[in-house]
Amino acid sequence: MLDFSNLTEQDFLDRKIKNLQFFRTRYKGIYDHFHEFQLSRLELSITPGSKDVQILEEGEPLYPTGVAATSAIEARDFVRMFSAKKRIKNFGLKIANKLPGKRFALDLIHKCGQESPVSKRHFEGYVFDGFVPSVVFLGVGLGLHIDEITKNTDIVNAIIYEPDPEFFALSMFVVDWQEIWERFEKQGYSLTFVISSNNNSSEHVRILENEMKKSLPLHPDFTVFLSHRNNISNIETFKGVRDRLPTINANADNFDRQIDHLNQELHNLQKGSPVLRPLRNHFIDKPIVIVGSGPSLDHRVESLKSQRNNIVLMSAGTGLRVLLRNGLEPDFHVELDSDFIIYEILSNSGLRSDNNVTLFAKSTVNPRVTELFPRSFLFFNADTNNVRFWGFDGAISGASPTCTNAAASLAVNLGFRSIFFAGSDYGFFSDQKDHSEDSVYGDPGNSEFIKRFQVAAGRRHELLEVESVWGGKICTRQDYLFAKIRVEDLIRAYRKSDNPPHFYSISDGARIEGTDWVAEAEFPFLVQKINRDQDKLADLQVAIGEGCGAVSLELLKARPAQLQTELERRCTRFVSLIEKASLTHRVDCVRLANEMRLELRYTPSDEGISGQVGVHSMAFQLIWGSTLQFIYLLLAHGLACEDGELDAFFDIWRKYTLQFFYGVPCEYKEKILERPLSGEDCRLFRSFHYEGR
């Protein structure tokens, strides 16, 4: 640790100049923000001849024993904790399940995990022997503890997070950031700075979460969080990131499903299906009710019946069957999922062949689904890279992970100002009834399909708890919690717009932050008060049609071949990386895993060339989910191996991972470039989950 007794004021000023020069070269954004930064609350207190320094906030010292002394204790404790062989068991070992039917990527992943020596015995935990895979430093202080820890501990990936820019500004006078950075400037290592520009920002959780997503799959299973000074605010930020863990794997579908969905999207676009654009400056004061299939819908459906003429009904996914079984036909229906099972569910929902429902479906929807509706509009989900790949100029943001989320975003983008959630419970009081009785998950009645579907779907996941609309707690599952978090993010984002819509909930489940919950007795009066546009639905249908577009035929012909070339380039780089890697010790697997993580997000030099952005981003999307699974296997099984198991596992992992990257271009060529162009059997689009059942 530094001894400041022989340093002069000029030495501190020179250190700041050196740090700014470093950031100007390596992190231009940090330099731009801090080269003329003015402190307003904090100051660095230097006493001539003293070994330590102090940080003052409005004249009061923040470190009772001095910054250096406090940092030395933190560093000493951390180094001691991870200097010797340590077994960590904070997360269990995830298992890749074998699904029915033949699949390229999933089968390789399953075989790799199944043949691993770790899978043949009881999981004893992950072994860190003299290294730490990933560390998040929550709070910089003056950077002294970070300097000491990174000097004495082998950390493969480090994230330095500081929500208060004044602390980071002061650290420039004291610690040598370039020296710290150089410790990570070697193959397989990485260092990231996450420095907020505003200490009072309400976005600190999302700022850190966004960076943590880039660290997948090092985060969360193999990451250590260290809070400087046990700062309460930073700990709360960490808890916020932890609470949002269900969101981190969003859109990380495996390669098999990505290829299947791209195939379906290509069919849909080649048919000339109209693609929805958000409607600008188009507002409707008639309330719209988005209908999911949560259990509370059973006793709220009568309210919807009584107000049918005063509301617009938009069913979301399995909510359609509930409405139809109660004599209600919605104006709009939304589908987000792309599996063939959706066609089967809709075919068994009671939907009449002469229905008058307008369908909004994600661009990758199974082509058979659009045949069930008289009017169908595709939409691109802004959470995926498909819209950039096809060069289209409109997408729906926040349209995942469930149909309810997509419906909410669509309602806003169609101009509705009063949006109600019904059957969007995101929770349940009993795991024996987590959906409406009239949904595909409820009472099967005499339907053989529903019985078969429920056996295939089964009861899923461990139970969690969230706050209910009544106060107290209600049960939920991880997928429900993810959907709830995302819809709250969507509401929060739209509330910042110039003319924000108002969100209401008539769902008697989990409390949805940002909505006003409406009791059953109050609903009719509120609807009649809001409804001022009795006859605007026909105008809306016209506006939707006029605002739609299509992907150009030129791009439909050119982009698939360009994507093939990009996949070949990316896979060649991965093959080279894996074949050259030396895998002997546990830390080797962490270094290779981190290098693969960085390679996955590598941006080619032609990224700025027109059209290439979409191709690169789509190639990333296709291989992202499965590549993360192979990296996870390398980390989890490599760190869980006993010393005598390492060589055998490394050989197994290398074999199946290389098969994947060698096979990706061939699989893509067969499924996308050489697929039948006409007269396809609908089974071409069978769901991966339900195929063969």
Image: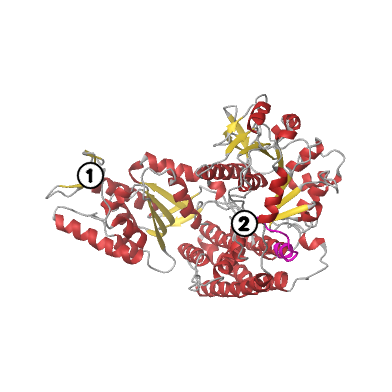
Residues marked 1 and 2 touching at CB (< 8 Å): no
Assign a secondary structure to mark 2: helix
Q: What kind of colouring is applied to the model shown? A: secondary structure
| Residue extending farthest left | 49
Q: Quadrant of residue 116?
A: bottom right
Locate the C terminus and report the quarter of the image it occupies.
bottom right
Residue at point 13%, 55% (across, down): 8
Point out which mark residue 119 bears: 2
Give the labeled residue for mark 1. 66
Assign a secondary structure to mark 1: loop
Locate the N terminus and report the quarter of the image it occupies.
bottom left
Q: Is residue 668 above or below residue 305?
A: below
Residue at point 41%, 62% (across, down): 190
Find the magenta span and give its range: 265-277
Measured from the top left, where is residue 363 in percent x and y?
68, 58
Q: How many marks?
A: 2
* Residue 297 lies within the magenta run: no
Measured from the top left, where is residue 163 in percent x and y?
37, 47
Q: In this view, does 626 lie above or below 207?
A: below
Q: In this view, does 42 lie to the left or right of 160?
A: left
Disc 1 residue type (three-letter)? Gly
Q: In which quarter of the image is residue 428?
A: top right
* Residue 268 lies within the magenta run: yes
Point out which mark residue 8 bears: none
Q: Nearer the viewer, mark 1 or mark 2?
A: 1
Q: In this view, does 531 lie to the left or right of 302?
A: left
Measured from the top left, where is residue 29 in percent x and y?
36, 59
Disc 2 residue type (three-letter)? Ser
Viewer-proximal residue among 508 and 331: 331
